Image (cartoon, rainbow, N blue to C red):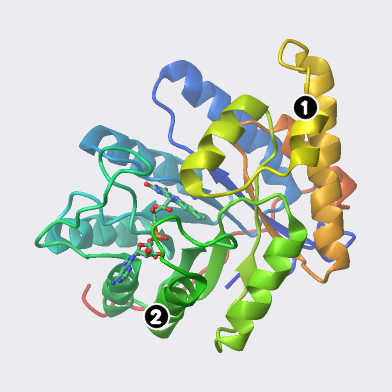
Amino acid sequence: MSRPNPLSTSGIDVSFEFFPPKTERMEENLWRAIERLAPLGPSFVSVTYGAGGSTRERTHQTIDRILKETKLTPAAHLTCVDATKDEVDAVVRQYWETGVRHFVALRGDSQAGVGGEYVAHKDGYRNAVELVAGLKAFADFEISVAAYPEKHPESPDFATDIDLLKRKVDNGATRAITQFFFDNDTFERYVERVRRAGIYIPIVPGIVPIHDFTKVARFSKATGASIPAWLAARFEGLDDDEQTRSHVAAAVCADQVLDLQKRGISDFHFYTMNRADLVYSICHILGLRAGETPAADTNEGEAAAA
Ligand code: FAD
C-alpha cells in the first residue's frame, strides 16, 4: 500500500498516469515528463494499456524501464479486451516476474472505440469484477479499479454502477480511481453514495489538467463526464492562444484540487497526458516540493499460482 509522501508539506499524496509512447520522439517526451515529476515523490505511477499486441508490449516496456531506471513504484493497467483468461494470466505472470505488484484492473472498451458496444471475449474475463478475482487468485496484488462519479455510460443507473464497484471491492480491489470530473459537488455526492453502499476503500479523484479544451470536451462526451458551462466559458476564445490557455488551465485545475482538499481529500491521481508542465505547477501549489524520490514500496508477497 502507498504511504504518506515525505516531500509533501500539506499531507497530500499524488499519483501520475502516463500512456506508453508510440514513437521515439514520444518516448523522449514521456521520459522528460517522468524525470520532471518523479522528484515530487508520487505514491505510484501508472501506465495505461491499449488494444493490440504492440501497444500492450509498449506498456510492458515502459513499466520495465520505470522499474529498472527509477525508484518509482509502477502500477500496470490491464484490461480484459480481446484476450482469453490464459492470455491475460500470462501477461500477469510476466509482470509478476519483473517485479510489478500493483495493477489498475479494467474491463476496457469495445475495439470499435469508446462508446461502441462492448463484447467480452468468449474465453476471457467478462469485466473488471472477474479480472480482479483472477489477479487476486494469482497473488496478493495491490489492485486499483475505475469508478465513475457520473456513472459509467453503459450503467442503467447509479445503483447498478455502484453495485459493480462493490463487487470489485469484494473480490479484492484496494483503491478506486475515478473518471475525471469538473464538478466537485458531483464527486462528493458520489462518495456519499459509495459509502452508503458499504464501500470503504479510498476513492481517489482522477484529475485531468486541460491542455486542450476541445479534446477534453470531445472525450467527455464519450465517457459521460459533463463539462459545466462555467468551465467552457473560461476557455472561450483561447483556441489560438496557447500561453493564456495554459495559465487558465493551471488556475482551473489548482482551484479544483484545493477545493477537494478543503473537503477532506488528500490523494489525487493526475492524468498527465505525458506532459509535466501543468501537473508540476499544480503540485507545487499543493505543497509538493522536489526532493529525492523515496525508495519504491516493496511487497514481498508470494504469487499463489507462481
Ligand atoms: P467494469 O467495472 O467491468 O464495468 C463497466 C460497466 O460495464 C459497468 O458500469 C456496467 O455498465 C457494465 N457492466 C460490466 N459488467 C456488467 C455486468 N455483469 N452486469 C451489468 N453491467 C455490467 N481503458 C483502457 O482501455 N486502458 C486503460 O489503461 C484504461 N485506464 C483507465 C483508468 C481509469 C482510472 C479509468 C477511470 C478508466 C480507464 N480506462 C482504460 C477506461 C475503461 O476501460 C472504460 O471506462 C471501460 O468502459 C470500463 O472499464 P471498467 O473497468 O470500469 O469496467
- Residue at the (16%, 62%) spot, across then down: 124
Classify the position of the N terminus by image quarter.
bottom right
Classify the position of the C terminus by image quarter.
bottom left
The residue closer to the viewer here, 93 or 232, is 232
- Residue at the (71%, 15%) spot, across then down: 239
**Residue 145 left/right relative to 187:** left
Where residue 273 appears, x then y in whole percent? Answer: 58, 35
- Residue at the (77%, 66%) spot, across then down: 266
- Mark 1, other Cα within 10 Å: few <14 / some 14–19 / many ≥20: some
104 over 17 or under it: above or below: below
- Disc 2, SS: helix
- Disc 1, SS: helix
Where residue 43 appears, x then y in whole percent? Answer: 64, 60
Residue 289 visible in the snapshot: no
133 over 217 or under it: above or below: below
- The amino acid pointed to by label 1 is Phe
Q: Are marks 1 and 2 in contact (CB under 8 Å)?
A: no
- Mark 2, other Cα within 10 Å: few <14 / some 14–19 / many ≥20: some
**Residue 247 left/right relative to 121:** right
